[in-house]
Amino acid sequence: MGNLMKVLTRDIDNNGGNFFLDFENAQPSISEREVWESVKETLLEAQVVLEELQTYRGAGEEIRQAIQSPSLEGVQEKAWSSVLPLVCKLKFFFEFSQKLESSLRCLLDVLTSGSSPTQQLEQKQALARQFAQILHFTLRFDELKMKNPAIQNDFSYYRRTISRMRINKLSEAGSEVNNELANRMSLFYASATPMLKTLSDATNKFVSDNPDVPLENTTDCLSAMASVCKVMLETPEYRTRFTSEETVLFCLRVMVGVIILYDHVHPAGAFVKTCNIDMKSCIRVLKEQPPSSVEGLLNALRYTTKHLNDEATSKQIKNMLQLN
């Protein structure tokens, strides 16, 4: 328990999120090792995915020329050859989303077990750290995807063009993206935040597939994680325990990610008064940061949550997010 620092003796946000979660150095115990090793492989691949997405440059110019010169075979061939390797990258991202879903379910299985999910987070900090890393990756991926319209354009061109290309061309790099897979990929990329939707769907499926695990176990796990992040960010003596400023942004992303996940999973959402997450304090923590570093996160709360615009959401919260 060396990594565990008690932050407060009182109950924080009425859900017991009163401990420091070591996002930088938490290491797995023997009981955590098997799940931790499995999820570690997914997280290593997540870094590759982000690197590939950050360097993704679309075939916009080649596609434009192909559209403008439909009768020039050479121009068509050039556009097709440019798009195929990009579609392979998009396939890689899509298939990774399925691995991410599997890893999330493995972590939820452990972190929601027992009578107190908050204790599970506290006692299994290495797995809680991996859960946070998945949320961090998810928001980062979706931020990058939203800023890159070439992804949708490239895949749309591929789908429009595949039916009229010669059969032998399908033996090239994009041949494995058949119609069935292309349909699934199209649904994935149609979402503004595809990785977040994957996690939301996976969490809801986890709840429905495990009727013996009370819904409260899952939502309490999520709300506790949000509260832990908030407390570490707003308490100077604990925030100074971070050895890197990157950990501050990590905490902010995790806090927002877990709020959005909670809002999609809990029937009443994250913005009602009965929610165990202190939304006003969470938004306040966000708005105290440099605007350039949190505008994307505030937009994520504004536009990717499910219940923000409900009548039950207070005007104060809507005003804090400038919705009125």
Image (cartoon, rainbow, N blue to C red):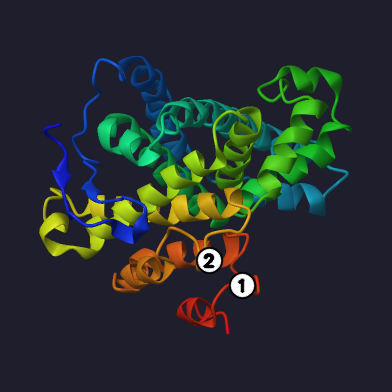
- Is 74 situated left or right of 129 in this image? right
Examine the rendered structure and indicate whether residue 227 appears above or below residue 41.
below
Q: Which residue is mark 1?
A: 312
Q: Position of residue 233 (x, y in %)?
A: 24, 60
How many marks on residues?
Answer: 2
**Residue furthest bottom as drawn:** 324
Mark 2 Cα shell of 10 Å, populated few (<14), some (14-19), many (≥20): many
Residue 198 visible in rendering: yes
Residue 183, quarter of the rendered image: top right
216 left or right of 277? right
Q: Residue at x 40, y 69 (%)?
A: 283
Q: Which residue is mark 2?
A: 271
Circle 1 — which element?
A: loop
Looking at the rendering, which quadrant does residue 205 occupy? top right
Looking at the picture, which amino acid does disc 1 mark?
Ala
Q: Position of residue 3 (x, y in %)?
A: 15, 36
Query: Is 60 placed above or below 323 here?
Result: above
Amino acid type for the residue under numbered disc 2:
Phe
From the top left corner, tell me how far across and down residue 133 is, in percent.
37, 39
Split into 4 quadrants, where in the image is the N terminus? Answer: top left
Disc 2 to disc 1, C-alpha distance? 8 Å
N-term mark: 2 or 1? 2
Q: Residue 160, position in %: x, y?
A: 83, 41
Residue at 54 percent across and 46 percent down: it is: 57
Q: Are marks 2 and 1 in contact (CB under 8 Å)?
A: yes
Task: Tell me the residue at 53%/66% (across/down).
Answer: 271
Label 1: few (<14), some (14–19) or many (≥20) C-alpha neighbours in 10 Å: few
